[in-house]
Amino acid sequence: MDIWNFTHEQLSLKKRVYLIIVIECKGSSPGRVGFKMAVSETGEINGSVGGGVMEYNMVELARKMLKDSVYKPFIKRQIHDPEAEHDKSGMICSGEQTHTFIPLDHSQVVIIEQIIKSINSGKKGTLCLNKVGLSFLNTPMDGSPLTSIVDVENWGYSEPIGLKDTFYIFGAGHISVPLSQILRMLDFRVVVYDNRTDLSTYNSNQFANVKQIIDYNNIGDLVTESENTYVAIMSFGHKFDQIILKQLLSKKLKYLGMIGSKHKVHSIYDNLREAGFSNDDFARVDSPIGLSIKSQTPAEIAISIAAKIVQVRNG
């Protein structure tokens, strides 16, 4: 369960939550701007702001605020230097990061629902945080998060929501479930398509943001051309893989991969050459898909694909 669904669940149960978000980083620091963690009054936590003793201290601070019924937005700087005069994190990375603590209660369930809807649909919006609290705007914000810190009383943070890396999986077989799970952990919006009905792995996939039964002959409008778009083709059989690949080869995508043996891949390429495609087109396809780690099981193959995606995304 991701942090927003966890938060929604807790608030729906009328449990208060502190949302902790990294809004600024300097130097070497385990967290990055946008890292999030939710701490419920039940003691449950979800997410991460970087780990280690610093994260432990931030969680304990949130728990203390909840226990003492202190519900006020504030920021907390952590300096990773044992010689620092104040705000020592307990780490020795030599950097620092600043967190915002936002208290949430049942009255804000609707806002969290808007955020979840924006993420699942890919519709752009903006998350805004300041000393008043949390808000969500349907107005899109492009680019990276923005932070303004004048002092502990005057600060603000805004972050684009819905503008996420999207991973399209064509084929809802056994690999799609662990792959969806890992990709969600990597903060991808995951869309799973298949042309089969009553498929157990399609029905059991609780990790995908979107699932849909489609006709593979008409997928052109389903995949958005973007530097934020990743695609893996792993349908049921050589025939459908070729149909899907043919419609995607001309699209500008961040990543395009196709599962299969070298023999199968070369056979598909030979067929597509007759349709006018060239080796330059095929050079854009990662196939056989993923990093070569001698994967055997669906989970291992999913890990190899995800590892390749991390490599591509991080340049």
Image (cartoon, rainbow, N blue to C red):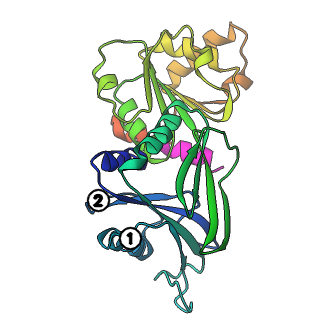
Question: Is residue 68 shown above or below 268?
Answer: below
Question: In the image, residue 67 lies at what x, y percent?
Answer: 29, 71
- Position of 224 relative to 49 (above/below): above
Is the stretch drawn in magenta largely helix, strand or loop?
helix
Q: Residues within 10 Å of mark 2 (few under 14, many from 20)?
A: few
The image's mark for residue 44 is 2
Nearest to the observer: residue 185 or residue 174: 185
Give the magenta part as a residue range.
304-315
Quick check: is 239 in the magenta stretch?
no
Q: In the visual, does 276 lie left or right of 247?
A: right
The residue that label 1 is drawn on is 70
Secondary structure beneath dot 1 equals loop
> Which residue is nearer to you in this view: 203 or 235?
203
> Is 192 situated above or below 65?
above
Which residue is rendered at x = 46% and y = 67% of the image? 72
Mark 1 or 2: in front is 1
The image's mark for residue 217 is: none
**Picture quadrant where residue 86 is located:** bottom right
The answer to which image quadrant residue 58 occupies is bottom left
Rendering coords of residue 299 (x, y %): 35, 39
Q: Earlier in the sequence, mark 1 or mark 2?
A: 2
221 is higher (above) or lower (below) than 290: above
- Magenta stretch encompasses residue 307: yes
Badge 1 amino acid: Val
Q: Residue at x 27, y 48 (%)?
A: 13
Could you say whether the residue bearing mark 2 is in a helix, strand or loop?
loop
- Mark 1 nearby-residue class (10 Å; few <14, some 14–19, many ≥20): few
Could you tell me if residue 156 is visible in this image?
yes
In this view, the residue in front, 227 or 36, is 36
Residue pictured at 38% horizontal, 69% vertical = 62
Label 1 and label 2: CA atoms lie apart by 18 Å
Quadrant that contains the N terminus: top left
